[in-house]
Image (spheres, grey):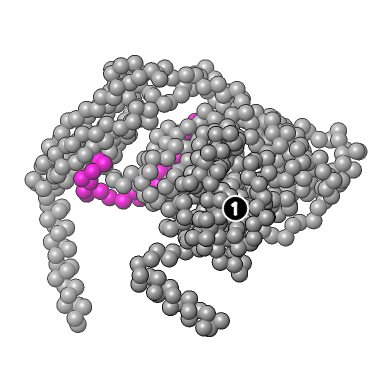
Amino acid sequence: MRPNSFVAFVSGVLLCAAGATASWAQESHIGGVTGHAAAGKKLYRRYCIGCHGPDGDGAGENAPWIDPKPRDFTLGVFKCRSTPTGTLPTDQDLFNAMTRGFVTTNMPQWLPLTGQNRADLVAYIKSFSPKWKTLKPGTPITIPAESRLTIESVLHGRQLYQKMECWKCHGAQGHADGPSAATLTDNKDLPIRPYDFATGSRFMCGVTNQDLYKIFMTGLDGTPMPSFADNLQPADGWDLVHFLRTLQPLDTPEAALWKAWLASHAGELKPIGPGGGGE
Amino acid sequence: MRTHSMLIPVAAVLVLGVLVRSGAVHAAAAAGTISGKVTYTGTPPKMKPIDMAKEPNCVTQHAGAPVLTETVVTGPGNTLRWVVVYVSAGDQGSAPGTETVRLDQKGCQYIPHVLVVQPNQPLDIYNDDPHSHNIHPLAKLNPEWNKSQPAGAPPIHTKWELPEFIPVKCNVHPWMHGWHLVLATSHYAVTGEDGAFSLSGLPPGKYTVTAWQEQFGTLSQDVTVSGTETKAINFVFKATPY
């Protein structure tokens, strides 16, 4: 360790002395792997340039035929983050997004690339926006342990779905048909759809309950999906997760519990929507 | 000892400086004013009534007086409202903005439609409606964020660090559109319906004054201010209906 850090220090000093801009922005750190922008550039020109373009602005030659449009890296605005709205994502966030791909978009999973390759790409992608030179990534939000799944939790989550007005976009049944769904636009004024829970597809930023929790606590920056972190307590967050899971046509524990409860209590529910109680 | 003996002359100079400044308020070295009016020629676009049917509560709030879009708001005598007039070059004597600026979301509108803040000036955003809004400033130099603010939620305390003209929208209510102008100068004015503006407290010097209108863009003029005079300048935008 010692000699390593010494070598790193000396080479850092040498780079600075040489006037090289060996900034943090040209490296990425994912676990123990360090990605390098120079290596990432070669990979980018082979795998990413077609959609994201030579300048990283999302205007590659395939872009006209793609909807939603490829990410414009020059803005430094990213959907899937572990960090609060308005902050840069961590290297790990970008690495995860690249690895996972974006369901319902043209962005595939990049699992065929090695971890080192993906880390190199993260380093290169950060070179497109000047924000990485002046700002640090946000501090990841704290996600407390998931609360116990109970019917009370699901019911409270349903109340929150009404109160936080999730239904205005996602619809009373989560079918992406709320009153505001048709007019949504992203930060480039292009039309964009809310997530349709009825598809049962993966969420934009992962598959787990934790990923779902993160989505509404951080917001999907650049899209109409805002952060609810200022107005949802952590326990509220888990209740909302439990309810949202029941909207998906999947065999989840939440759905099973909900179905069993509904069988004898369906009549007690006020419908969700304008003037609805959600109770 | 050393530092003390240094401090005394420094303090003396400071005191002198303050005396000179305060004594000079009405003297030749005092500040001038640039004032005038913003008008248009040609045909401006007609503002359309906003259909707020999606949010019945907002329809009720405006019952009887349907709200019009605010992209180009005119007054009698071809004046233009919501124009920001500011010193864009040669700025001197600016003070940092310290007073908290307030933005309200009321009746599914941003009030005011156009607001000016200086870098790091406190900005409080209130939701006065009995339903949710999401505030989504489409900043490019500053961080772009997007926060939900449900009914009864506390105000959002925020600020902008870098000068930038930021469009702000609410995704839930797509007609809601406003502007946050982050200006590095404290010499600015937002025109009312009479199109009038006045930039005061300008030390003698050569200034570039710019008028910005969200649809018509910017106009600039160079103005030299000496003494306590009030220089009159006007801005005339060429309006097109589309």
The residue lying furthest to the left in this view is B28
Query: Residue B148's quadrant in the figure?
Result: top right
Mark 1 is surrounded, within 10 Å at the Cα level, by few (under 14), some (14 to 19) or many (20 or more) other residues, namely many
The residue that appears at 11% across and 41% down in the rendered structure is B226
Q: Which residues are magenta?
A: B87-110
Query: Does the image show residue B26?
Result: yes
Classify A228 as above or below A118.
above
The residue that appears at 47% across and 37% down in the rendered structure is B168
Q: Is residue B178 magenta?
A: no
Say what amino acid the circle numbered 1 marks: Arg
Q: Residue A57's x, y, as percent?
A: 48, 44
Indicate the secondary structure of the residue bearing disc 1. Answer: loop
Q: Nearer the viewer, residue A49 or A166?
A: A49
User: Would residue B204 appear left or right of A153 to someone viewing this image?
Assistant: left
Q: Residue B163's x, y, as percent?
A: 36, 46
Chain under callout 1:
A
Classify B67 as above or below A54.
above
